[in-house]
């Protein structure tokens, strides 16, 4: 691991550069991309906000949806606005990561 500012070699786990004091960059493996709050392409019911939140915190999506539904149906407008805001703010799950669906049956391979 190297300092992003001066290139000084940092000890593993160091939080700041001992040379220039720059905060050490977090290695990519500490926060895998799956932990980002995104709206999954698959498994969404409306906009994927509930599914994204449940996936981000490791919850089951069903109680999250029920809680959101009950809160919205209780007559308060703000949860609905919050949902729409979350819909706009939370990005879609990046495409090209089709781990959630099996590969479609393609043409036969070149093997005899
Ligand atoms: Zn440095």
Image (cartoon, rainbow, N blue to C red):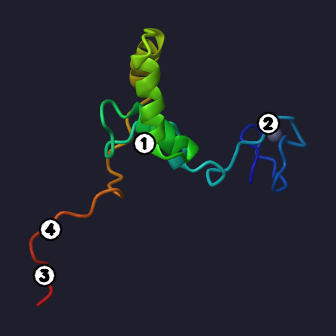
In which of the image's four quarters is ligand 1 placed? top right
The answer to whether the residue labelled 1 contacts the one labelled 2, judged by CB atoms less than 8 Å apart, is no
**Secondary element at image label 2:** loop
- How many numbered dots are placed on residues in this image? 4
User: Horizontal and vertical percent for residue 35?
Assistant: 55, 45
Q: What residue is disc 3 on?
A: 110
User: Horizontal and vertical percent for residue 22?
Assistant: 81, 35
> Dividing the picture into quarters, in which one does residue 20 lie?
top right
Quick one: quadrant of the N terminus?
Answer: bottom right
> Dividing the picture into quarters, in which one does residue 66 lie?
top left
Q: Earlier in the sequence, mark 1 or mark 4?
A: 1
- The residue under the point 39% across, 18% down is 73
Q: Earlier in the sequence, mark 3 or mark 2?
A: 2
User: Horizontal and vertical percent for residue 61?
Assistant: 44, 43
Marks 1, 2: nearer the viewer: 1
Q: Earlier in the sequence, mark 1 or mark 2?
A: 2
């Amino acid at each position: 691991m190297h300092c992003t500012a001066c290139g000084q070699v940092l000890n593993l786990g160091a939080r700041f550069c001992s040379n220039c004091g720059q905060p050490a960059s977090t290695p990519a493996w500490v926060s895998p991309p799956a932990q980002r709050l995104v709206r999954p392409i698959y498994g969404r019911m409306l906009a994927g906000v509930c599914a994204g939140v449940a996936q981000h915190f490791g919850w089951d999506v069903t109680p999250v949806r029920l809680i959101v539904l009950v809160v919205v149906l209780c007559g308060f407008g703000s949860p609905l606005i919050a949902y729409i805001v979350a819909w706009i703010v939370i990005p879609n799950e990046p495409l090209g990561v089709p781990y959630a669906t099996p590969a479609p049956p393609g043409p036969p391979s070149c093997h005899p």
